[in-house]
Image (spheres, helix red, strand yellow):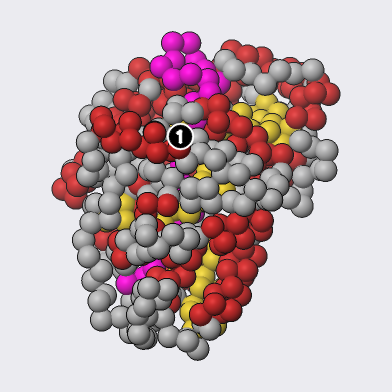
Amino acid sequence: MGSTSGENENNGTADVGRRDLIKRSAALGLISVPAMGFLSACASGGGSDNNSSDNNQGKTSKSNPFGVEKNGKLDVVIFKGGYGDDYAKAWEANFKQKLGVTSTHTGTQEITGKLQPRFNAGNPPDIVDDSGAQQIKVDVLYKNGQLLDLAPVLDAPSVDDPSKKVRDMLIPGTLDPGIQEGKVVALNYIYTVWGLWYSGKLFKDKGWEPPKTWDDFIKVCQAAKKDGIGGLAHQGKYPYYINVAIMDMIAKKGGLDAVKAIDNLDPKAFVGSAAAQAGVEAIYEVVEKGLLMPGTNGLTHTESQTRWNQYKAAFITCGSWLENEQLKQTPSDFDMKFLPMPLLPGSKMPFEAIRAGSGEPFIIPAKAKNLPGAKEFMRHMLSKEWSTLFAKEANSLTILKDGVDASVKLRPGTQSTVEASKAAGDNTFRYLYPDWYSEMDTAIQNASNELMAKRIQPKEWLKRCQAAVDKQAKDPASKKNRHE
C-alpha cells in the first residue's frame, strides 16, 4: 500500500464493506488480486484544492474536467528503477495523442539531486514519481507546503466510468500510504507485495522445500552453507530491505496489534514488546550462525540481487519490483519465486499473511507550472488503458481495480506474487510509519544496519528503535496520524 494514514472511517463496518467490495472486484482478468483486508481505513483526502486559480487552465468539460489546454507542455520526472520508465513514455505519447500536450521526460535515479534544487527555487516539475533510494521524503515535502492535495483528482469523474469518482475505482486501502494529516498528497500507484524470494530452479536442483516455519528456514540456510552458498542475502547498503524481514517477523508474530503499536508510537512499540523481541532475535540468528551471504552487508541493492541471481544465496528480501529490476541479470531458467516470511512459534498471523499494498508515490508539486495538465495526467494514470500499458511495460499491477487487460501475461516472479496475494486473502498488513515519519524510519534502518554487521545485539536494536519512536511521539503533529 502506499503510505497514507487510515482515518475517517470506523473500523467495524468499514472493514467489512471494504472486504466485500474487494471480493466483488477481485477479477483482474488473469490476475485476480483479492481485496485484501487493508489494515487501515481508506481515508478520503481532506481539504480542498488550494490551487483553484490554476495557471494554464482552459475551458473545462466532462471529458476535460481540469481544463487542459491543447499544445501545452508537461514536465514529467520518473524514477528509473525496478519498473524502468518505458511505461511513462507510453503514457506521454498517449497523452499527446489524446490532449495535444507535449511532455518533457526525465528518467533518473537521482531524484533528490535533480529535484531538490528545483523545489527550493520554486520551479518544480509538473508530476514526479518520487521513489528510490534518493527519494525526497513525502512527509518533508508536505510539511514544507510543497505538495498538492490530490482530492480534486480523486473526486474527478473516472475516465472509464464518468458516473463514478476516480477514488471509487481503486483497490480499497491503497490510498492510505499517501495520506499526511488526513490529506492524500501522494498517489502510491503500484500494487506491491514484500517478502522473501528464491530460485525455483535452485530449490528443485537441491531438493529443498520452501520453508513455512523459521526453523525450516534456518535449516535451508544451513544446507546452503554446506554447499558453499549463502543462506540469506540482503542489500546491505540500504537497510530498508532487511527491515522487510525484521518488521514482517514482528507483524506475523504479534499480529496487527504489533503493527499498530509501532505506527501509533506506543511507548512499548519495541522495548516491552514480545513480538518485536522475537522478530529481531530471529533475524539475528542468521547473523550469529554465519548464514548471511558473504559480503552482503557491503553491497548495494543491485549488487546483492545480482549475486543472488548467480545462485550465491538461497534467499533475498525485496518487494515485487525485484523481477523487473533484475531482468538482465536473471538466467532464463531461474524461475523466480516469492515466499511469505516463515513463521515463528506462536505467531498470531498465518504463514500466508503478507505485507501488501501500494508503493511508488507519484506527486504533483503545489507550484507546478501546468497544474491542469498534471491533474489530468494523473486521472489518466487511473484508467484501464494506462494501467494496462503499465502492466505491459513494467510487469506489475496497479492500484486500479480490474485494471489490467486479460491479454497481459506476467513473468514467473510477478505471477507468484499474484498467487501469494490470493492465498493471503484478508491476511495482509502494511506499516505506515515509513510514510508518516521518515526520520524515525531512517533511525530504525540505521539500527538494523548495525545489527546485521554484528556491531549491536538485539537488545540494543530494540532500545534504539524505541528511542526513535519516543522522539517522534514528542512531535505534536504526529497525533494527527492514527493507524486504526
Count of numbered circles in the view: 1
Is the magenta region chiefly helix, strand or loop?
loop
- Residue 165 vertical placement versus 200 (above, below): below
Q: Nearer the viewer, residue 127 or 404?
A: 404
> Residue placed at 77% from the left, 48% from the top?
329
* Residue 270 place in picture, x, y as percent: 33, 27
Look at mark 1 in the image and give the residue it sits on: 23
Secondary structure of the residue carrying tag 1 is helix
> Residue placed at 32% from the left, 21% from the top?
273
Residue 481 is covered by the magenta coloring: no
Q: Residue furthest top?
A: 346
Residue type (three-letter) at the residue carrying disc 1? Lys
Q: Quadrant of the N terminus?
A: top left
Q: Quadrant of residue 394?
A: bottom right
For the residue carrying disc 1, how many other residues have a C-alpha within 10 Å: few (<14), some (14-19), or many (20+)?
some
Residue 343 is covered by the magenta coloring: yes
**Left or right: 163 as drawn, with respect to 130:** left
- Residue extent of the magenta highlight: 341-366
Q: Residue furthest left?
A: 476
> Residue placed at 27% from the left, 55% from the top?
45
**Left or right: 294 as drawn, with respect to 285:** right
Q: Residue furthest bottom?
A: 71
Q: Nearer the viewer, residue 282 or 103?
A: 103
Evaluate whether residue 118 shows in this view: no
Q: Quadrant of the C terminus?
A: top left
Q: Quadrant of residue 385?
A: bottom right
